Image (cartoon, rainbow, N blue to C red):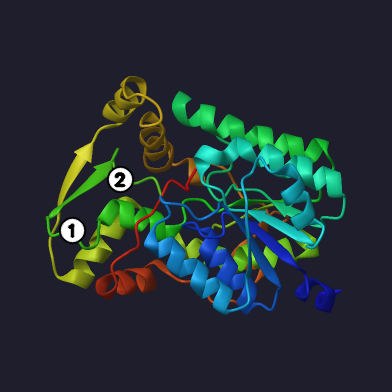
Amino acid sequence: MAREAEASRILIFGGTGYIGKHMVRASVSLGHPTCIYARPVGPATLPSNLNLRREFRSIGIHIIEGELEEHEKIVAALKKVDIVISALAYPQVLNQLKIIDAIIAVGNIKRFVPSDFGSEEDKITPLPPFEEFLEKKRKIRRAIEAASIPFTFITANCFAAYFVNLLLHPHNPHDEIVVYGHGEANDIGKYTIKVANDPRACNRVVTYRPKSNIISQHQLISLWEEKTGRSFKRVYVPEEDLVKLSQTLPPPENIPVSILHSIFVKGDLMSYEIDDDDLEVSRMYPEMQLTTIDQLLNIFLTDPPEPARAAFG
């Protein structure tokens, strides 16, 4: 069983994106034949994306260029793989219905991991703009369940590199850091590949919430001050201001504000308990070394963080 899982053929949608490329590299490093379904190269394709595609081809990754509307092309690709992972950014969430249709048509997929990687949408109720977005993700979950497609839903709970960069702006010369609310509400790629091949995670929700990485905004800022030798002025944004912005900003600008409220003010990531029989990634794989917040900040001291595109929620 274990050897069979190690040989699983994996197809990743969004494999050249912010999260997806880390999953692709992890998949290859763990010995899986890996391919990517990506948009065709065009005039708007960034040089960094072209370089990434060259890197992937050099290590044997097959890139299938196509649109999500090309049903037959997706079906043909799915016939050659065992596991499907979607790392599509949040504006494309409902486009995953096209992937589901193709998975139903082929009938051979052993596991589908949709693009969640954010909050546990079945357990929280945030401000309306974020709630509307999460309802789209719930629609994907319910469609997968209704089609009896073997799945793993992943709740990454505010993955560190994105939000540490968002809060600290590590290479910003200014000595101000924005604190949302009162500041006290407290490596995705490799773990996603692991759980997608793990029989324990079939038709289950897997939560990424290691205790060692639970930290408040104030604790994070203090740790950054200690490492940099700088002192930062905390500029507070009251909860009522975030709520007002969520009501007055036009979509999609109101969504990130609502996400900030959910995470940093309400503390939705920590508002529900993880029971002993729930699947939490650090408990599933205690032998694997997690990147701690302390280690991440050490990386930020020397390496500029890459620009993050809309991939959270």
Q: Earlier in the sequence, mark 1 or mark 2?
A: 1
Residue 292 x, y percent position in the rendering: 43, 70
Determine the image quadrant of residue 196.
bottom right
Left or right: where 226 falls relative to 53? left
Q: Residue at x 75, y 57 (%)?
A: 77
**Label 1 neighbour load within 10 Å: few <14, some 14-19, many 20+:** few
Q: Amino acid at mark 2?
A: Gly
Q: Nearer the viewer, residue 31 or 39?
A: 39
Q: Is residue 195 above or below residue 89?
A: below
- Mark 1 residue type: Asn
Q: Residue at x 37, y 42 (%)?
A: 264
Q: Secondary structure at mark 1?
A: loop
The numbered disc on residue 183 is: 2
Q: Are marks 1 and 2 in contact (CB under 8 Å)?
A: no
Circle 2 SS class: loop
Residue drawn at (70%, 74%) of the image: 32
Q: Which mark is residue 291?
A: none
Q: Between residues 115 and 211, which one lies in front from this camera angle?
A: 115
In the visual, does 21 lie left or right of 64?
Answer: left
Disc 2: CA contacts within 10 A as few (<14), some (14-19) or many (>=20): many
- Report the residue that reaches farthest toward the front: 43
Q: How many callouts does the rendering have?
A: 2
Residue 172: image tag: 1
Taking the image as shown, residue 209 lies to the left or right of residue 299, namely right
Q: Picture coordinates of residue 166 (x, y %)?
A: 32, 52
Answer whether residue 204 is visible to the viewer in this image: no
Q: Residue at x 65, y 41 (%)?
A: 96
Q: Is residue 6 above or below residue 243?
A: below
Which marked residue is nearer to the observer: mark 1 or mark 2? 1
